[in-house]
Amino acid sequence: MPITAQEALTRCIEHREIFHDEMLKIMREIMSGEMSPTMTAAILMGMRVKKETIGEITAAAQVMREFANKVEVDGGAHFIDVVGTGGDSSHTFNISTASTFVAAAAGATVAKHGNRGVSSKSGSADVLEALGANIMLAPEQVAQCVRETGIGFMFAPNHHPAMKNVAPIRRELGVRTIFNILGPLTNPAGAPNILMGVFHPDLVGIQVRAMERLGAKHALVVWGRDGMDEISLGAATLVGELRNGEVREYEIHPEDFGLSMVSNRGLRVADALESKEMVLEALSGQPGTPREIVTLNAGAALYAADVVGSIEEGIELARQTIASGAARAKLDAFIACTRRLGA
């Protein structure tokens, strides 16, 4: 007998797992709007309290992918998303967004999946808009942008229309649910490589194993010990890595790569306009902490994309790419492409 919503809720209350096929059914009812708002809210909260399992997260991500408006594009051998869960409350500029342009200019193909800021001062969509990009492209236009420039941006609401069924519930609840960790697992272009930042150390192992079950090729999931959902310059960073079908967890430090440990306080911004200025500063190669943290994260992205064989090699390539002006040129080409396609 298929599981009912009431039975799923009882499992949550009793701190028992909802198994994979059962979670597929429950999630389809939630995403389609078949389940009542009351029951949806109860199950979301029940799962949050008992803590979502890797199996539940994987099944939920599979259903979100089913319901998504996909971007059909061949990203080649170095196809990656550089993304964060958000919710780290560090209020830093958009480091992962800046890193994508360095990675794309250095040989990766990037399909970035992002949204407006919720807990942050500036989400990836906010800063790209401030930079002059058109973020409202249709899936086929995003694919064309990837083909032309090696980078595309997928604004989450354009690709996950079924989320309208849960948006009012999430808004009213006002607390984290499983949906806060599903975004990075549901890239509409199906990029098999990923550099993902998370807001809690427990998610490092959980998300990398979910990516493994979802068929990822090479994934790095990171959490800075200072709370950042990026690789940090201000503290050690926990890493979960999926490579060649194996998962391992380890810790890295800025000094491992010849970088100085620097507080991230100077990376904080008040809004998207301040974030824009810091992105431009980093991509233009101005000496300082913004450039260094983008170089570090872009280096990791190039490693996750299999453009290079180590983070060290990635950092060196990222440094050269910024210094040559190629990273800033990639940003300009991307903005021009989105404006032309979206005109």
Image: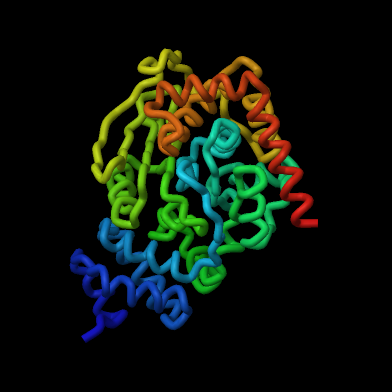
Q: Quadrant of residue 284?
A: top right
Where residue 191 appears, as percent x and y from the top left, is 46, 51
Q: Which is nearer the eye, 317 or 155?
A: 317
Q: Residue at x 73, y 36 (%)?
A: 332
Q: Which is nearer the eye, 289 or 283?
A: 283
Total number of numbered labels? Answer: 0
Q: In the rendered image, is residue 268 in sight?
A: yes
Q: In the rendered image, is residue 167 in sight?
A: no
Rendered image coloring scheme: rainbow
Where residue 123 appears, as percent x and y from the top left, is 59, 46
Where residue 46 appears, as percent x and y from the top left, is 31, 66
Tell me the quarter of the image containing the C terminus.
Answer: bottom right
Q: Quadrant of residue 225?
A: top left
Tell me if residue 128 comes above or below residue 18 in the rendering.
Answer: above
Q: Residue at x 53, y 47 (%)?
A: 119
Please indicate whether residue 213 sits to the left or right of residue 104 in the image: left
Q: Residue at x 40, y 43 (%)?
A: 198
Outermost residue toward the right in this view: 343
Tell me the quarter of the image containing the N terminus.
Answer: bottom left
Outermost residue toward the bottom in this view: 1
Q: Quadrant of residue 110?
A: top right
Q: Residue at x 47, y 17 (%)?
A: 262
Where residue 152 appears, as percent x and y from the top left, is 61, 48
Q: Which is nearer the eye, 153 or 182?
A: 153
